[in-house]
Image (cartoon, rainbow, N blue to C red):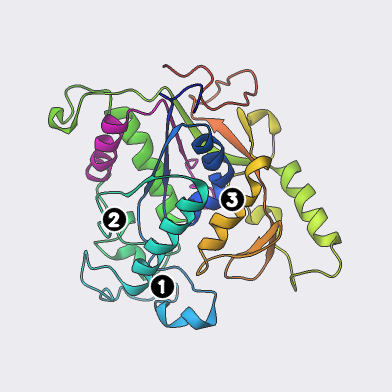
Amino acid sequence: MSAAPDRRLLLVHAHPDDESINNGATMAKYAAEGVHVTLVTCTLGEEGEVIPAELAHLAPEQPEPGEPAQEPAAPAGEITPLGRHRMGELADAMRELGVTDHRFLGGPGRYRDSGMMGLSTNLRPECFWQAPLDEAALHLVRVIREVRPQVMVTYDPDGGYGHPDHIKAHRVAMRAAELAPDGDFEPGAGEPHRVARVYWNCVPRAVVEEGFTRLRAASPSRYSAVAEPEDVPGLVDDEKSVDAVVDGRAHAAAKAAAMRAHATQISVAGDTFALSNGLGQPLISTEYYRLAHPPGEHSGGITQDLFAGADA
């Protein structure tokens, strides 16, 4: 049992697999300690590319940049075959991490994957990118007021790498954190609750570069090519901007297993992985976070515990 059974951690992510890549070790660590870990995923990832040839039939047609908006491949609210499959992958990943409370924002299929920035899929009225901010935030407010987390984790304002759904997940999470303690906002959505600490995913450049150096030195290489540090979401140049470091090395195997469960999206080999582009990346099990504090303000130190200073 945990020494702090009343600790509650909420993570807000855009698609199935984002949670395992960004926070898998953190989630496994806190779940093992008895913390109540809740994952909210905003879409089913219906526009994701598919890696295994045997699952290629699930892949959506990929529109070209600038292509006129097309009719949706499935009616609004209907779950596509890939979306259904990725729901199963997410459930398998959560079992590997020991997380039992995982939900989709507004329910499965409420918001559709928007695809990469600049594609016609961004224009579909049912996609997450087009969702009215306060409407989407209300769904998360309900979760916050029910679960009452002390800590929430999501992306930085750029969504880590500029994907529309990641940016929108950031905006929805921050707006929900603003609205949840307001007793005048939707009183029927539960008792007001203030999230004491909001963190954004990040990773220092020095850590990423060390991982890529190790990957490039491997002989024989598992990959024909490797990615670049700039391909890693949440890259920060200044290590002083990091506010929290979670040592998840004891849970590296659980993180790798969770990532492996997302087989349509990720290929895992030992302590490395690749996405659909086939470019090798190091699997980092020590995870880093920035406080979502006002611009110019810094915590003044690095904590090893996301709950440090959070209200009980």
Read off the residue under disc 1.
66
Residue 152 sits above or below residue 70 on the image: above
Along the viewing direction, whichever of 5 and 78 lies nearer the viewer: 5
Dot 2, crowdedness within 10 Å: few (<14), some or many (≥20)?
some
Q: Secondary structure at mark 2?
A: helix
Report the amino acid beneath label 1: Gly
Q: Is residue 195 left or right of residue 206?
A: left
Residue 114 in sight in this render: no
Dot 3, crowdedness within 10 Å: few (<14), some or many (≥20)?
many
Read off the residue under disc 3.
255
The C terminus appears in which quarter of the rendering? top left
Residues at marks 1 and 3, CA–CA distance in whole angstroms: 37 Å
Residue drawn at x 41%, y 78% is 58
Residue drawn at x 48%, y 72% is 49
Report the amino acid beneath label 3: Lys
- Image-quadrant location for residue 138: top left
Residue drawn at x 63%, y 56% is 231
Dot 1, crowdedness within 10 Å: few (<14), some or many (≥20)?
few
Q: Is residue 97 left or right of residue 77?
A: right
Q: From which residue to which does the magenta span run?
A: 134-162
Pointer 1 or 3: first along the chain: 1
Pointer 2 or 3: first along the chain: 2
Read off the residue under disc 2.
130
Q: Secondary structure at mark 1?
A: loop
Residues at marks 2 and 3, CA–CA distance in whole angstroms: 32 Å
